[in-house]
Amino acid sequence: MSTRASSFSLPPLALPPLASMALAMLLVGASAPLGELALSGLPLFVVLAARLALAGAALSLYRPDAGSAHPRPLTNGEWGVLAFQALCGVVVFNVGLWLGMAQSGPAAAGIFTSATPAVMTVLGVIAFGERPAPRALAGVGLTVLGVLAARGAGGGDWTPRASDAWLCAAVAGEAVFLLALKRLPPWLGAFGAARRVTWLGFALVLPLGAYQALGMLGAGLGAGLGAGIGMGTGTGAGWGGLVPWLAVAALGILVTAGGYVLWFAGVARARASQAAAVAGLLPVGALASAWLLLGQAPGPLEAVGCLAVGAGIALAAR
């Protein structure tokens, strides 16, 4: 089965697929530091619901595909793919990443997220019948090694623990999310797919978001849900302050709306092995955004790792 599809339009800006996916991963990489800021004053599902509501509103207001004629309605199976994407990429990834980082630490999160390109390569073989060339496999491997170096895995203090299952779930969820779009019809478009996935994700997290929001209002409901399992500290203690809400706005507009559209526009025109290599930029984006937002400057090992990621992407792109 061919893994290429007709290109998704991204008006008014049309980027090469690898550039589009690379920008998406750099934006999505900011999820960790922005999430840390948001969750310092707000519960997890309030952050997720607000983030997705903002992203959905932005994607609904700005609709360059509004005049496009769709040849047919989406089938139940295609809606199922979109719902599965929302479940994996919105709920499983974010909940798994946050709980994993909270209980296992950032070193473990770095090691596990470095496996995303390899998991995507395996999924490309299983789901799309792709047979990556040796050069592409070498590029993915170089990307993984670069990410491990960039995260300082060789000198980290990570030891395996049961809570690492959350991080495994996060990596699997993100890998499925990043490749599932290739199962959708090309005419849906990047904006159409991003808009639907965003609102489906919002519907999935809204019940728990509303439950936790009641705790923030002082009703006594939902407070235990967030406080007991590390889902944020803003449970029943006001509305979290300005900084957490600014972080939520950035997560919604830049990371979710911008990141989804850019990734969807690129992955439809790329091989699964290329998408897997570019996914190595996700933790690199986390390093860069942590430097800019939290003042955590990368060291020489991180710089070498980032260069290796770039070389791996270039190798896999051929």
Image (spheres, grey):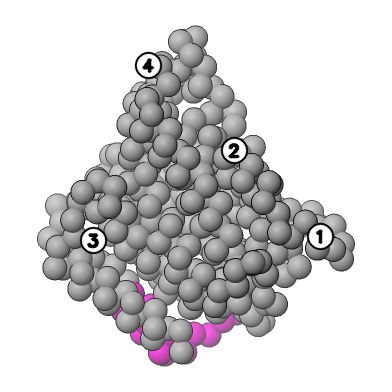
Residue drawn where x is 69% and y is 47% of the image: 60
In primary-sequence order, the first of circles 1 and 2 is 2
Give the spatial CA distance, label 4 vs label 1.
Answer: 45 Å
The magenta span reads 128-143
Magenta span: predominant SS is helix
In reply to whether residue 250 is colored magenta, the answer given is no
Give the spatial CA distance, label 3 vs label 1.
Answer: 45 Å
x, y percent for residue 296: 20, 51
Q: Residues within 10 Å of mark 3 (few under 14, many from 20)?
A: many
Q: Residues within 10 Å of mark 4 (few under 14, many from 20)?
A: some
Give the spatial CA distance, label 4 vs label 2.
Answer: 22 Å
Residue 53 — which label? 2
Residue 151 — which label? 3
What residue is pinned by disc 4?
A: 237
Q: Is residue 240 shown to the viewer in this render?
A: yes
Give the spatial CA distance, label 2 vs label 3.
Answer: 32 Å
Residue drawn where x is 44% and y is 55% of the image: 28
Where disc 4 sits, the SS reads loop
Where disc 2 sits, the SS reads helix
What residue is pinned by disc 1?
A: 67
